[in-house]
């Protein structure tokens, strides 16, 4: 898990694939490629288009062979790769805004819903329906010709399933690092992205505060 130790400055992971997946859904894990949003120690793990490809491949959204082909193509089109990365980051922030609102019991921002829908339409426009398992047919994306937006297409298409959950929504947002997650606990009591990470830090802060006050 790519995190920090209290008292030690945060540094980006060498590899985005080291970022722990606690979201319970690929779209939420994609949103979680930023830690500690709007804080001094904010970390963006999607540092470049290569990191975007690496994340998509490690999440099982594209094959290693397809990733290698797309990496070669991206190196020949650096300006277009940068634009594709910007679109991916835009989708990521849209997912976060919607997810955070739902986790708080609020209506998602209308403009964010419109952007999420537009991204999904764009992704599905590039997809085809293919058999992905016994009796299972789902959107898939052709590996050729390589397209620089390919890594985020499955994320945009899959995010709709998060929105389809009936209220009360099972979404949560970590009060420490701002990661999103699906709360599948029996009584919807999960508070932290990880009890052993952000949860431990919060308990440590409370412990130090109690001892400082005495």
Image: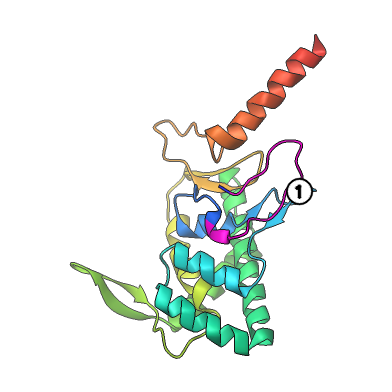
Q: Position of residue 45 (x, y in %)?
A: 64, 60
Q: Please tell me which residue lies in front, 103 or 8.
A: 8
> Quick one: which residue is furthest to the top in this view?
214
Q: Position of residue 165 (x, y in %)?
A: 43, 51
Write the residue at 67% across / 79% down: 82
Secondary structure category for the residue under label 1: loop
In the picture, measured across the screen, residue 83 lies left or right of residue 116, that is right
Q: Position of residue 29 (x, y in %)?
A: 52, 55
Q: Residues within 10 Å of mark 1 (few under 14, many from 20)?
A: some
**Which portion, as a residue range, is magenta?**
2-17
Placement of 53 over or under 189, stated as above or below: below
Q: Which residue is mark 1?
A: 41
In the picture, measured across the screen, residue 109 lies left or right of residue 212, that is left
Q: Is residue 177 magenta?
A: no
Write the residue at 67% across / 80% down: 83
Placement of 47 over or under 199, stated as above or below: below
Placement of 185 over or under 75, stated as above or below: above
Write the residue at 63% across / 82% down: 81
When asked about the image quadrant of residue 200, the answer is top right
> Quick one: which residue is furthest to the left in this view?
134
Answer whether residue 123 is visible to the viewer in this image.
Answer: yes
State the colouring used for the structure image: rainbow
Placement of 53 over or under 99, stated as above or below: below
What predominant SS class does the magenta segment belong to? Answer: loop
Answer whether residue 191 is visible to the viewer in this image.
Answer: no
Q: Is residue 11 magenta?
A: yes
Q: Position of residue 60 (x, y in %)?
A: 41, 65
């Amino acid at each position: 898990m790519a995190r920090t130790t209290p008292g030690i400055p945060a540094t980006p992971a060498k590899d985005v694939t080291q970022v722990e997946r606690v979201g319970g859904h690929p779209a939420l894990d994609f949103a979680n490629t930023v830690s500690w949003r709007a804080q001094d120690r904010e970390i963006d793990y999607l540092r470049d288009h290569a990191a975007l490809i690496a994340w998509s491949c490690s999440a099982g959204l594209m094959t290693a062979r397809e990733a290698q082909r797309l990496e070669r193509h991206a190196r020949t089109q650096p300006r277009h790769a940068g634009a594709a990365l910007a679109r991916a980051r835009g989708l990521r922030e849209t997912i976060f805004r919607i997810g955070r609102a739902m986790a708080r019991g609020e209506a998602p921002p209308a403009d964010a819903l419109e952007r999420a829908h537009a991204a999904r339409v764009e992704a599905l426009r590039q997809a085809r329906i293919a058999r992905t398992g016994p009796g299972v047919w789902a959107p898939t994306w052709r590996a050729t010709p390589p397209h620089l937006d390919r890594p985020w297409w499955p994320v945009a298409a899959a995010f709709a399933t998060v929105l389809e959950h009936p209220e009360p929504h099972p979404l949560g947002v970590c009060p420490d690092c701002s990661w999103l997650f699906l709360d599948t606990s029996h009584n919807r009591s999960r508070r932290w992205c990880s009890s052993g990470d952000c949860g431990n830090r919060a308990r440590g802060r409370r412990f130090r505060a109690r001892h400082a006050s005495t």
